[in-house]
Amino acid sequence: MDKIIIQGGAPLNGEVTISGAKNAALPALSACLLTGGWHTLDNIPQLRDIWTIREILSNLGVVFEEHGQTLKVNSDNLNNHSAPYQLVKTMRASILALGPLLSRLGKARISLPGGCAIGARPIDLHLKGLSLLGADIRLEHGYVVASTNKLRGADIFFDISTVTGTENLMMAAVKAEGKTVLHNAAEEPEVVDLANMLNKMGARIKGAGTDTITITGVKELYPARYAIIPDRIEAGTFLTAAAITKGKVRIKGCSVDYIGAIIKKLLDSGMEIEEEGEALVAIGRDKIKPVDIKTMPFPGFPTDMQAQFMALMCIADGLSIIKETVFENRFMHVSELRRMGADIEISGGQALVRGKKNLSGAQVMATDLRASASLVLAGLAAEGQTEISRVYHLDRGYQGLDLKLSLLGSKIWREKY
Ligand code: UD1
């Protein structure tokens, strides 16, 4: 296994390009199950969750041709409809195969995702929606077993805004007979990206990016070429890295539209962010002001940036309150940040962070994807050396974060243990 070692205190300086969005690439790859022929996906990030979904799709009979960040995908010969536990347990988003398989084959057998470090994370809303479209759903031996003779459009109301739930239902509905309306749909940019790709494949989807998405079923879909949007969480992580190291970073490739809430909070904390052509220039300032945040579905502050923002607040000049409303139990990073000297108190769904002048390097353990990014950021700012173990969590969702940081001047490297 790898661990990451950081010698803190070096300000970042230079330019970084943001990779394709993991959370847009995963549904886009799943959407290739909907119809045969060669699909071409550009800007696919190289990270572990992508390899996992590729393994799941390969297991179903999908073949790939890889040319750098471009992936050609062909699902002509689907010979299986099952996603096994060994693959699904490492990545919840595997459930994204359910909707397309039902649409294409009329059957699917996907292992239940199981426990997750950041809360219960059920999939009841995916299953309820699919039943309303006409699927028969059973839970057998830890698997969701779904089948249908025909999917028919329906009115579906999500009790909670769910990103992958909206994506799964959208993919199931594209070829269903008649009209499907998704109410209280997720408005995340990755949902819009999937809708754009599906429309390029011949689907008729309107309203993606609002809370009401209307899908008019079509008889046929075609393979398409599509470029994945940049990863807004990676962009937010680099902005925060500039703030926490009081450095200057030019961030290329991410639209401001995707990261408005993150930019607003970082500006409130005192850093400077300027648009310069296609890029953002982020400049960290000596004094970091305390800022409260509350995680919300898009366009609110993303839960996937909560841990990284908390690392910044650990060295702010005063008290900040961080409220997590999307996932319960998403404060696993707190005990590790405390090992680095942070003063954080958890009370209910919120963390009270009393900023300190310095963090001190320590041995810490990554507990989930975004928690690991938060520890990397804390390590960049801390005095002395930080050693982060279990960085396979980080590798699930960031393309070469440590490499990109080292090119920006961080003293960061990997060792085996
Ligand atoms: C997606 C993202 C993840 C991000 C999250 C919230 C992907 C691959 N992952 O995860 O990075 O943190 O959105 O922005 O895109 N819920 C239910 N029942 C369901 C589904 C969800 O109760 O059937 C609840 C969840 O427990 C959670 C909330 O709804 O409290 C939002 O979860 P959801 O948007 O579904 O998260 P994911 O799609 O799993």
Image: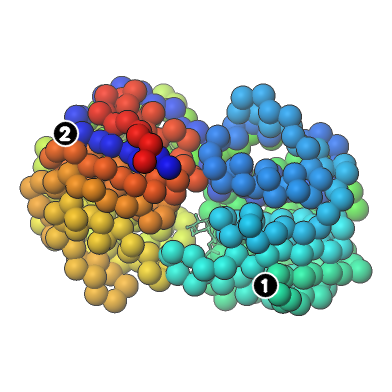
The residue pinned by badge 2 equals 9
Give me the residue at 75% from left, 40% from top: 200
Q: Which image quadrant: the C terminus? A: top left
Q: Is residue 311 left or right of residue 112?
A: left
Give me the residue at 71% from left, 63% from top: 110
Task: Confirm if mark 1 falls within 8 A of ligand 1.
Answer: no
When the figure is inspected, residue 325 is found, relative to residue 248, above or below; the finding is below
Residue 236: x and y in percent read 37, 43
Q: Is residue 315 left or right of residue 132?
A: left
Q: Give the farthest residue toward the front.
A: 417
Mark 1 or mark 2: whose residue is earlier in sequence: 2
Q: In this view of the protein, which residue sits in the foreground, 337 or 214?
A: 337
Image mark for residue 142: 1
When the figure is inspected, residue 154 is found, relative to residue 308, above or below; the finding is below
Q: Quadrant of residue 346?
A: bottom left
| Residue density around tag 2, few if under 14, some if 14–19, many if 20 or more, within 10 Å | some
Give me the residue at 41% from left, 24% from top: 277
Q: Is residue 39 left or right of residue 219?
A: left
Q: Quadrant of residue 403?
A: top left
The amino acid marked with disc number 2 is Gly
